[in-house]
Structure formats: C-alpha cells, structure tokens
Image (cartoon, coloured by chain):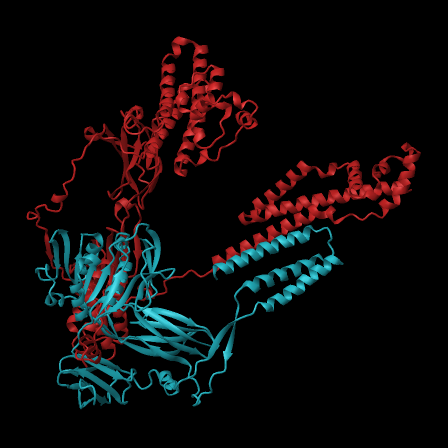
Chain colours: A cyan, B red
Amino acid sequence: MTTWNYFLLVAGVIVAGWLIIQEVRRPKKGRLAARIVVTLVAVACLVVAGWPLYVSREEAPPRPAVKAATPAAGIVACDWPRRLSAGAEWQVQGRYRNNTTRPVILRLAGFDTTLDSLVIAPQQESSFSLSALPLHQGRAVYRITAMAGKDTLEQQPLPLEVMPVTPLTVLFLAQAPDFENRFLADWLVQQGNAVAMRTLVAKNKYLLRFSNFPQQSLDVLTPALLDKFDVVISQAGAIDRGTRARLEEAGIGLVLKADSAGTQPRPLQLKLRSGRRLPVLYTDPGQVLPSGNGQLPLVTDSLHRAYVTVSLAGAGKLVRSHLFNTYSWQLEGQPAAYGQYWSALLEAAARKKATVEKVTVHPAIARVYQPLDLQLETAAIPTLQAGGIRLSLAQHPWLPYRHSGTWWPQKTGWQQINTGTSVSWNYIFRDDDWKNLRAMHPSSVPTPLRQTSLLPLSPLWWLMPLFFTLIFLWWEKKM
Amino acid sequence: MNDVNGHMKIAGIRTRWVRSQQLRYGLLSIALAAPLALFGIIPAIAGGVLSLFVQLWWHKPCRLQEEEVARYLNQTFPELEDSAALLLKPAADRNLLETLQAEKISPVLENLQLPGKFYRPLRQALLIASFMVAFTIGWHMLNTYLAKLPVTTNNAPGPATKPEKILPGINGVQITLQPPAYMRRSALTQSAFNITAPDSSLIKWEIHTNKEVQELSLLFNDSTRLTLQPDVEHTTWTATRTVRKSGFYQVSMNDRLSELYQLQLVPDQLPVIRITNPKPFTTIEFGQSTKVNVQAALTDDYGIRDAHIALTIASGSGEAVRFKDQELPFDNSFSARLPRYQVSKTLNLTAMGLKPGDELYFHIRVTDTRRQENRSDVYIITLPDTAQLFSMEGMVTGVAFKPEYFRSQRQIILDAEQLLREKDSIGTAKFNSRSNDLGTDQKLLRLRYGKFLGEESESNVGDPRVAAEEGHDDHDHGHDHHGKEAHEGVDPGDFGNAAKVLDEFTDKHDNAEDATFFDPEIKKQLKATLTEMWKSELQLRLYKPQEALPFAYKALRLLKDLQQQSRVYVAKTGVKTTPLKPEKRLTGEQDKIRPRQQKETAAYQDQLLKVRQALAALDAMKAGDTGGHAAVLREAQQLLTTQAAATPAAYLPALEAMRRIQTLKSTEKDIRTAQRGLQKILTAPPLQPQRTPAPVSPSLPQHYFHNLKTGTP
C-alpha cells in the first residue's frame, strides 16, 4: 500500500464518519438506515475510484506444439550447488507439485538432523527454497524429504562437497590511518588471509603492515608486486591513475572508498544484494552512488539508494563504497553482519581464481548405467580417468582447449574423476533417484508461460454507482 | 373516576421508572462484576453486591416523588398543557377551573405512550453489561486457549529414557548419593548406574552379583580405577568416592567392561544479590537526611553463610583525593544459614565522617555455605559540595549570561542562613517578617525566570514605576530593558494614543515570542528550577527558612548547570599568535620520522576441522566405504571424549558409538548416533570471502578482452 492509498483510506473513513454523524443528527429520521447505507456506498465508491485498481487479463497462450506428458507430482524441479566453500550458506531450490489433499512438509536434513523445512499447501504447485549452513568438510549426502503427515512421499539425495577455503591476499592503500582499515585487516588476518597495508603518515613516509605476507617495499607499486594481490582496498586519493590501469589490465579487483563520508549521518537500515538485512549503520543518505548503467548496487537502503556498487573495470571489478564505519558492527558485537558485508564486497571485487583445468558433467543428475558426457578444458595434454576407466577424448573442432568424452558409470555414490593433475568427485545417482525430474525433462520443450497482463480499471465503473447513490440522497431530501 | 385513573397512571409511570432504574443499577453491577469474575467468584459477587448497594444508596430511586413524575410528563408532553400535577391533587381540593382542566387532560393522559427516551438509560446499561460480559468471556476463552497451547518441548530422544545395559552377572546396583554436609540434604538412593548428583557428593556403589566374582572395579574417564570391596560371599561389592568433576565411568567385572555410564554433577551456584534500595547513583542534597538505608535480597541455592557491606569513602578532590575502606556487617544474623535473606543496614553518613563533596562507594559481599563469594555492583552515594556553587569562576570571565539572576538566588541562601544564625537574638516578629521578605525576593526571582518561559508576569514585576510605588528596591533595575523603555517613553504627544494606553493597562497574557528564546531542553531545566523556587518560597513564607534551604540549594545548583549548559563562548584569553610564514610551510624535516613496520603471521586453524572431516568420513562409511578414515576418526573421538567428560549426558551415547565404529563392530545406527554427537560439538564455520574460479587459462573471454584492448584481431 502506498502513501496515497493510506491517505485515501483515512480520508474516506473520516468523511464517512462525519457524514454518518450528520445523518444521525438530522431531525428527519425517516429512512435513516437507508440513507446511512447509501452514504457509505457513495463514500466507498469515491475511495475506490481514487484507488489504482487493476484487473488481470489472461491472454490466450499459444497452443503448445507437443502435448506434454501427464504432469508428475512431487519435486518436479530441484537444483543446488554441488560444491561449496566452508562457511557459506547452502541453498536448495526447486518446485513442488502437491496433488494430494494434505499439506506436504518438505524437509532438508543432513546427518539425521533437520536443517530447514517448509510446508506446501494442498493442491498447489509452488517453488521452494531451503537453506542450511553445512557443518562438515568433504563429501556428504544430504536428503530432501517430502512428508504428508507421517507418510514419507519422497526422499531424494542431495550430494554436497564442502571445499576448504583458500585465503585471499589484500593490499590496503590509505592516506591516513583509520579504524575501518584496521578492523578489516584484523578480521582478514584472523581468518588466515594475507594483508599488506600502506598508510601515509608524512610526506613520502608510510606506515606498513605485513600480515601473513613477506615484508617488502611498497613505495612503488610495480606490476609484479600488484600481481601478488587479489584485491586492493584504497581511498580515492591514495591510488594513482597508472596503478588503476595496471589493476584493470591484470584483472585485480579494486575497492574504492570515497574521500568524504558526508556530514549528516542518520541511522539507516541497509540490505545486501542477497536480500540479507544488515544492522543499523550511521551514514549520510545524501552520499549515494548512481546505480544502473553498468553499476550494480551491492548495498542498498530501504529506498533502494545504493551505497556500494560494483562495475566492470577492464578485466577486473571496481567496487565503490560510501560506507566508512562498518567497524561499528564489530564493536556492537555483530561480527556475523560484518563478515557477511565484507565477504559480499570482497567476493564481488576479488580477482578470479586461475584454474588449470576444468571438468564439466552433463547431465547434472548422472545416473548409473546411463551415458554421461564429460568435458575437460585444459591447455595441457588431456587425460581423463573416471571411476577407474580411462576415457578417450575428442577435441572440439573450434576450441582447441576443450575435449569431451562419454562415460558409463558402473557404481552409485561418489566416483572419482582423475585428470592428469587433479582429482574431482562426482556423485552417481541410483536409477530411481529424482524420477520426477526425469519425467519433466522431455516436456521441457518450451511450455508457454501463461501471459497475464494487468490493465488499470477505469474509475468510471465506480462513478456510476456513486451517481446513483447521490441521486437517491437528493431525491430523498426533496421528498 | 377520571381523576383516580389519572393518578394511577402517574403512579404507574413512577413505578415503571423506579423499576427500570433498579434494573439499570443491577445491570451496571453485573458489568462491574463480570471482569472481577476473572479473579474468582468471591470478588465478583462481593464487588457486584457492593456496587449495587452503593448505587441504590446514592441515587435512592425509590424516593422519587409523584410530583417529579408529573413535572417530567409536563415537560415531555406539551399536550398535557402543564397540568399533570392537577391530577395528583385530591378532587375535593380543586377549584372549578382546575376540575375542568383535569377533566380535559385525563383522556390525554390515558392514551399517553411513553417515549423511547424513557428507557434510554436502561438500554445503555444493558449495552455496557452485555459488552463487559462478552469481553470477560472472550478474555477467559483466550486465556484458556493460550494455556492449552502445547508447550514446545525438546523432542530429541534423551539418553535418560534409554534403558541401561548392565553387564550379565550383575544382579542389581544400589547407589547412595550423599551430598556434602553443608548442603544439609538427606542422602538419595537409586538403582541405576547413570548418576546425577550435587557437586562434591560422596557416592557409594553397592553392586550385587548373582555368582561369585573375582574382581570388580569402576573405571573413570580420568583413567583412575576404583576397586570395589567384596563381602565374605563375594557377591556384594561396595566402594565409595567423593566426586568433584563430571565425567563418565565403566564397570569392569573380571576384565569385562560395561558400557559407559554418565556421572553428571550439578554445581552449587553463586549467591545472588539484588539491592532494592538505594539507587545505583544517589545524590543527597544539602539539608536532606544523611541516613541511607541499604536494603538487599540475598539468595542462594543451599544457604548463605555471611554477608558484609564494603564501603569506600573518597574525600578531597583532584590529586588530594583520599580513600578510606571500611567493612560493616548487616544487622541480620546469618547463623541459620537460610537460602534466602532480606537484609538491611542504615548508613549514617555524618557519623562515618562524610563531608560535603565526599563520595561513598559501597558493594555487598556474600559468602555461601560452600564459601563461594559473590559481590554486587558498586553503588555510589554523593554529597555535593555546596561551596562550589558559590564560586564566581566562569562568570567573571568571558561573556556573562545574566549573572545578576544567579547572584540573587545565592543572596537569598546567604540571607536565609544569616537569618537562621540571628534567630535567637532578633525575636519572632522580626524573624517572621524577614523570612517573609526573603520569600518576596524569592518570588520576584521566580517571576523573572518565568519570563524566559513566556509565563505571564503578575504584579508587573520589573516595571520600575510599580516598584517605586511599592517602595521596593529593585536591585536588578538596569537589566530590565522593557521597563526602562517604558520609563523613558513618556511623551506628551502620546496623550490620548489609544494603542499606547491599551498597551500599558491591558494584561498581556503569555507571550509566545518569549517562549521561543531557549531550546526545549533548557526550558525543561528552567521549569524544574522554578518548581524548586516555588517550594523555597513556600517555606520562607511559612517562616521556615531551615526547610527552605534544601530547595533553594537545589534551585541554585540547577541554575548553575543551566549557566554551564548555555555557555556558547569560550573564555577570553589574552593569547597573541605569531604570524604565519607561508614560505616555511610544509618544509619541516621529516628524516627523523620512522613509521613503524608491523609484521605478523597468524595461521588460521579450524579447531574443529577433524570433527568436520569425521562427519564426512562417517557419511562415507554409511554408504559402504570403510577404508582410510581411521586417523580422522581417532582425532574426532579424542575431542568427543573431552566433551563427554564435561557433559556426559549429551555426548556419552555418541562416544560409545564412536568406540564401536573404531572397532569395526558398528551398525548404521551407531554411525547415526556418532554423527548426532559430533554435530552437537560443531558450530558453523566462519564466513570468508572466496574467489570465484576463472575459466581455464587461454579461454575465449580472455582472447576477446585482449583483442579489445590492443585493437588487433
């Protein structure tokens, strides 16, 4: 409801109240009830006429070319990240079609512990999103279970591999010592990341800090030195144009903080791009950044004003920030919010991890005794072993670094895929896992979406009854 | 005949009115009784009956006169022609005209319909009563509904519910838990091996075996062994031990080990202190009583041994501050060692040697019967130094903020004290008159401050003409600009100027513009000051200068604060700065500046990493993969053992399951149990920023970017 709607509602109630009082006080008491009812109808019509109302009109969908198979019930679509770094939130999303007359509880469980659950109303198809913070490290199989009362309708495995975290290397450039940099560096170092910090304290004199990083001179930022870092966090005045060009060339992320924080801080409720709410922070709402036009807002307030944005800058990313006092979250005892904020920022900015080779698997739900396409991208000599079987690879005709082969898995469960240099794991499902997903696949030929458009309703529809009521009131007075 | 009818009709209306009023009071009483019914039936009946009687006694509906009814009818029905009272007159007493009139209106009265308004009070009462009854029933139903809501309980299967596995050959066990003597609890006896006992209990095991056993002992988690002593038949074995740490134990019979049994100790909590009086920060104004009553509630789970109040007196100021420590016992006796005491102690600050300007810090120390000591927060009592208020510092320098006003309040205090000193020598009449004069001064001061708040100024205070007429010496003469202007502005040309005359002789009420001089915070304090001045004036007018002094002092202190607050200017200093030499700016020698180079290495190690890996390893074992996890599982088991020693109730089943898994004699149920136990140890790992993987090195996007930069295809 917008302010206008509230205003209309309040004004309508006041007018109706006043009119009813007038009616009651009127000496002529005949047809009092009728007059009150008609007055109410008149006021309601007036309010509704001002209310922006819409009607949804369904446009006839184009007739599907192929008749889809009978729709399956249960989990008809589901996806989840197969690999996750430790500490990150894991989300399982999909659609559930409930054909039964009972509500169905979807439950995400790991190691016999329910982590998240959700209720699907009877006779409804709706999407679901379950989330959890995985506790284990390595490979494990979680389960998603659909329960109706005490009956288990469906249980499906959700394989997940939690990877150990790899530390970041961060360079701080500052024109003056401040709390923001210090708290951030401490937080990063505490988690094993490498930090180098250069803070100007006098003309050409720098305060240096090297944490988990070899001590060296930071006076001149050579390309070779910059190449050791993943992210540079700097004030706008502490970095020169040449350095920025070198960062863009090398694809190193830059977090650029504005020089001024504004003069009129107010408590603001900020929100991350993922939708997570952050605690209140004192910031000047006048100091907002332009978004759109290549600038993606990362942190916004309730009015969608952007305080942190990210944009492409050469091969790297440029994050602009107008928040200078996020360390107050640490002091307030909100380290979780602090961690989420800076993880989001640094992840958006950080240079991408160079990979030597990459194995992709198609289809995503790999079943036993079913062909599985493996694709290997590597610059080296390609060798691929899956489940102990050496695969013969075919090179892509146009992309010389891409090779593909077919594998028929013999066993279910986690299976090893060996390339020349690394080992990765892929989960092979049993033949009867995720049956509904497979049933959906042939019918995944473009199912035309139902087109509904919202048309604003003409206020004339409400003015007509209004006129009738007014005519009645007038006529009654003349009688 | 008509007369009789008319009279009866009026009497009937009267009865109807009386009935309706009685019914109305009954309904109102029900309305009152309904909510009271929530507290019980007795208050409802008592309240209802009481209110009914009170209403009947107050309104006395039965006393309604028939003349009143006639008057009512006359007022309501014009057709009665104001003659209803005639019908009440006996026919014999009426004169001719009255008889005729009575005959005329009798039929009208006969056909009279009482209006709806007549029953309106009754209808309202009915509405109120039904609303209250409905409200009460609704409230009651809501309450019962809320009470019926299922309490969410932890539905995890507790290990306590699981039946214990006992070694074959053991017939039964009798465990006696003797809590330590200071708890003064009786011994408990149980026949289960899992023990939950108060801290430092003496535990006696008495194990009965069904046949002769060579050796029976208890193995504790700290790898100590307690050998049980047999009786002559070697079937009843006993041992005792005082347990001071939680943990678990096993029964070993002829080298056969039982499962693990928990040994959970319930610790003795620290005593709790709740101070109810005084407040954490107390300021005792000059003239108030210097006796402070300290009241506190002390509670402990077993008993309180002793309690003291520890005082620290801080006297002096600045560097010359001195501290004096003192410890006082409470008036109560703690010999009964009760778990709950209500203690109090009166501190006589004067007797303890506290002077104005001193501060007293105190806290309460309580020892329980286990000799565990706990102390409360520190409470502070301040005696403000009134001498500070008289200092002229801050007023003579800089821009003064109307200093005269403050001096006046100070003068009143000084005069009042002088008056008190001279009381014996000047006689009552003089004393009273001087006290009254002081009261007048106080009033003038109050009115002057009231002006700042935009208050109406009565009796033209500050107007010099009035002051002159009254013969009152206004010592703040020069400061009232308004008065001055009025005095100078006597111009013969103004004679007959209506606006001027009106301006002089009308009572100008609260001036809104005056009310905007200060911000609300200052005004609030000003108001508080005025209140104190009022009280001071009251006491002075009652010839009680002694009682007036505390209020006067408080007013002075508030004024002083006000003066400090609204100071905008910095005190004048006679400093002359040397002129800047622009050519020398930014040319300082910096070669001595050697900024610090901080260097550190902090290796991050997840303490629970092995447990996390063990969780995944167990998952692999569930799927059938058993090889290569031994090291991880062993380390996880160590962590689990330390956890189980601290809280055996939670982790003991998982530890047992882990042990079976290690010996490869496990079932899937054991793996589940172990995973549950490991999960309890784990917390979510900290969130860390991660780099996203890039496409493999010579990829299409990289080619594209490179060619875009160089501009060559």
Q: Position of residue B570 (x, y in %)?
A: 27, 33
Please determine whether, in this image, residue B424 is positioned above or below residue B534: above
Please determine whether, in this image, residue A466 is positioned above or below residue B421: below
Q: Residue furthest left?
A: B591
Q: Residue furthest front?
A: B493
Quadrant of the snapshot with the C terminus of chain B: bottom left
Which of the 4 image quadrants contains residue B677?
Answer: bottom left
Camera-nearest residue between B356 and B141:
B356
In the visual, does B137 lie left or right of A159? Answer: right
Q: Position of residue B632 (x, y in %)?
A: 17, 70
Which of the 4 image quadrants contains residue A175?
Answer: bottom left
Please determine whether, in this image, residue B334 is positioned above or below residue A359: above
In the visual, does A153 lie left or right of A57? Answer: left
Camera-nearest residue between B257 and A250:
A250
Camera-nearest residue between A477 and B183:
A477
Write the residue at 60% across / 50% down: B132
Camera-nearest residue between B588 and B474:
B588
Q: Residue furthest right?
A: B96
Q: What is the total number of numbered labels drawn onto the structure image?
A: 0
Q: Is residue B531 visible?
A: no
Q: Position of residue B638 (x, y in %)?
A: 17, 65
Q: Position of residue B49 (x, y in %)?
A: 63, 42
Quadrant of the snapshot with the N terminus of chain B: top right
Which of the 4 image quadrants contains residue B680?
Answer: bottom left
Please determine whether, in this image, residue A468 is positioned above or below residue A376: above
